[in-house]
Amino acid sequence: MCSIKFYILINYQDQKAVVADDIPPPVPYSAPYPSAGQPFLETDIQYSNLGMLTVICFHCYALHFECEKLTFSRVNHPKFDMCCLQGQIQLPFLQPLTEILHNYLTGDDYFSREFHNNIQQHNAAFAMISVGVKIDNSVTRQSGPYYFKIQGELHHFTGALLSHADQTPMYVQIYILNTAEQLNVRRANNNNLDPVVMDNIQTMLLDSHLPYWPVLSCI
């Protein structure tokens, strides 16, 4: 038993090691390797074609592959259950974008590029609450796509509705001010952002997306 172990050790460290005549050679491994252990060959690839993504659900208009339809579907009336359960789930259509936001998202002028390059800061500048989270920077500082990894719970800080006299208003506290003061505070907190873009976003939010702003302004 000891001689066999000695043989294996020598054979592992040095393939040219001389084996004594009294040590039997190892039994060759004749069983086939599993699929994961076999060498990769391009010729072994099997392609599967699902066809075109053009089959439409008659209820929600979602696009599907032909093979995704239910077995009892008719040829001229395919049925699916992975999108809307054959009409049982009904979601309203998205409202059209305002002209200002549409131009910033699709345009290529100076203001649109400024909005694209600082879109995260613009979003934070008009937020009503702040995110309370412990960020794990072990992946955020690496190369490649941006990752947002947290540790522990994810919650939000609301804070007091009214700011102290010696503090600058933040988040929802800004919405209580009149429109001119709101813009001045946001410019002071984000002096690197274009004031024209901030003014347009504020006007869009107050006119189209914040119907309860008059209630806040009366506090």
Image (spheres, helix red, strand yellow):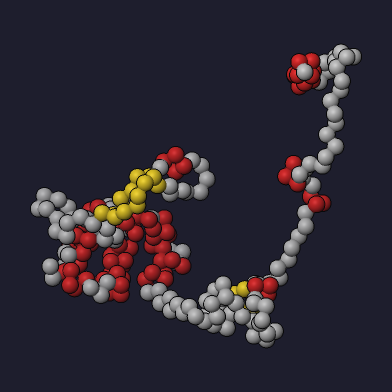
Q: Is residue 102 above or below residue 1?
A: below
Q: Is residue 202 above or below residue 185?
A: below
Residue 191 vs residue 27, the one in the foreground: 27
- Residue pushed farthest front? 1
- Quadrant of the rendered structure where residue 105 is? bottom left
Quadrant showing the N terminus: top right
Give coordinates of residue 25: x percent, y percent: 86, 22
Residue 128: image quadrant is: bottom left
Q: Quadrant of residue 96?
A: bottom left
Name the outermost residue toward the left: 165
**Residue 212, position in %: x, y?**
23, 73
Q: Residue at x 79, y 15 (%)?
A: 3
Does residue 9 appear to the left or right of 141 in the view shown? Answer: right
Q: Residue furthest right?
A: 21
- Residue at horizontal 83 percent and vertical 34 percent from the top: 29
The structure residue drawn at horizontal position 60% and vertical position 77%, both measured from the top left corner, is 80
x then y, percent, for residue 159? 20, 55
Q: Nearer the viewer, residue 15 or 147?
A: 15
Where is residue 8 drawn, in percent x and y?
A: 77, 21
Taking 193 as reference, is 46 left or right? right
Q: Nearer the viewer, residue 180 or 161?
A: 161
Quadrant of image for the C terminus: bottom left
- The residue nearer to you, when weighing 69 against 24, is 24
* Image side of residue 39 versus residue 153, left or right: right
